[in-house]
Image (tube, rainbow, N blue to C red):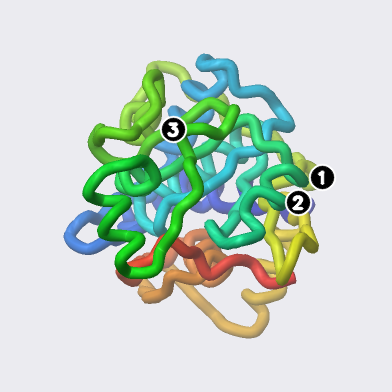
Amino acid sequence: MAADLLVDVLNAARTHRSSPAITERRTTITYGQLLTRVLATAQRLRGNGFQAGDRMLFSIRPGVNAIVLALGTVAAGGTVAFVDPDEQFQRRIDLINPRWAATESILYAASVPGPLRALARRRGVILPSYAKLGVRHIRSGRWLPGVPRGALSAEKLAEPVCFNEFPVCSPDQDAVVTFTSGTTTFVHTRGSLGAALRTLATRRTLATGDQIHTEHLTLGLRALVAGAQWTVMPQRVNRWRQPTT
C-alpha cells in the first residue's frame, strides 16, 4: 500500500487498540480511544460544514486534544496550517486563506482587551486578534471571555459517535502547511509525510511497548505508526516542532 500518514496511524490504532498511545501529563489514551476520537472528530467536523480542501489555522499546544483534532481534520479531508503569531502572521494568513481556526481558549482571551492581554503585553507578547479572523472557530479548553460565540469545542467534537467512516488511502491529499522564514510556504501531503515516516523507520527501530518523549510532530507520529507510546513533553509556548522541509 502507498505511504499515507493518516491511514498508517489509524491502521496501527486498529492493531494495538488496548495499548497506550499518547500520554500528556497525567492523561493517557489507548490506541482504541485515539481511533474513536479521530474518526468522531472527522465526522462531526463534516457535520458542521467542514469540506474537503478546507484549511485550518492551528494554534493549540501539543497534547492529546491537539493530536486528535489535527488527525481528525486531515481525516475530514482538510489541511492543518501551523502559523506562528509573529509580525508575518497576517501575510501568512492571507496566503493560506484558512476557513477554520483551532485555538486555545487562553489565546482568545489574551488577544482581546482585558487582564490576560495586559499581562501578555507586559511580557512582550502581542497576539493577533484570533476572534476577528473571518473563519469558523474551534476552541481547546474551557470557555473564557474572548472566545467567539458559536466556537465549537475540540473535546466535544471527539466524543464517540455511533458510526465512524474509516478514511481511504489518499496520498495526494494536502495534510500540513508550514512556513520557513518570511512567507515561504511548504505543503506536505499525506503521502509525503507517510513516506518520511517510513524512511525514519529504517533509521530507528520502534516497537509496541516502546516509549518516546518528544514534542516533535514527526517523531511522535512515527511512534504512533509503530504502536509505541508517545509522551508529549510539556510546552510553555504554543509551538509545535513541525515537519522538516
Q: Position of residue 98 (x, y in %)?
A: 66, 36
> What residue would you read off at disc 2?
189
Q: 39 or 136: which is nearer to us?
A: 136
Q: Classify 133 as above or below 4.
A: above
Kindly identify the residue that appears in the image at 76 percent across and 40 percent down.
Answer: 170
* Label whose residue precedes the other's in the sequence (3 or 1): 3
Q: Secondary structure at mark 2?
A: strand
Corner quadrant of residue 100: top right
- Name the spot of residue 104 as percent of width and height, x first: 37, 45
What residue do we see at 53% from left, 37% from top? 101
Kindly state the secondary structure of the residue where label 3 is placed.
strand
Camera sees residue 235: no
- Left or right? Give the position of 184 relative to 68: right
Check if mark 3's residue and mark 2's residue have beta carbons within 8 Å: no
In the rendering, at what x and y percent does residue 147 appear? 35, 32
Q: At which x and y percent is residue 224?
A: 48, 60
- Mark 3 and mark 1 residues within 8 Å of each other at the beta carbon: no
- Residue corresponding to mark 3: 138
Which amino acid does the dot numbered 3 rest on? Answer: Ile
Q: What residue is shown with label 1?
A: 172
Seen at 53% across and 70% down, the residue is: 241
Q: CA distance from mark 1 to mark 2?
A: 6 Å
The quarter in which the C terminus is drawn is bottom right
Q: Is residue 92 left or right of residue 9?
A: right
Could you say which quadrant of the image residue 87 lies in? bottom right
Asked if labels 2 and 1 touch by Cβ distance under 8 angstroms, the answer is yes
- Dot 1 or dot 2, earlier in sequence: 1
Q: Give the distance between the C-alpha atoms of the residues marked 3 and 2, in whole angstroms.
A: 23 Å
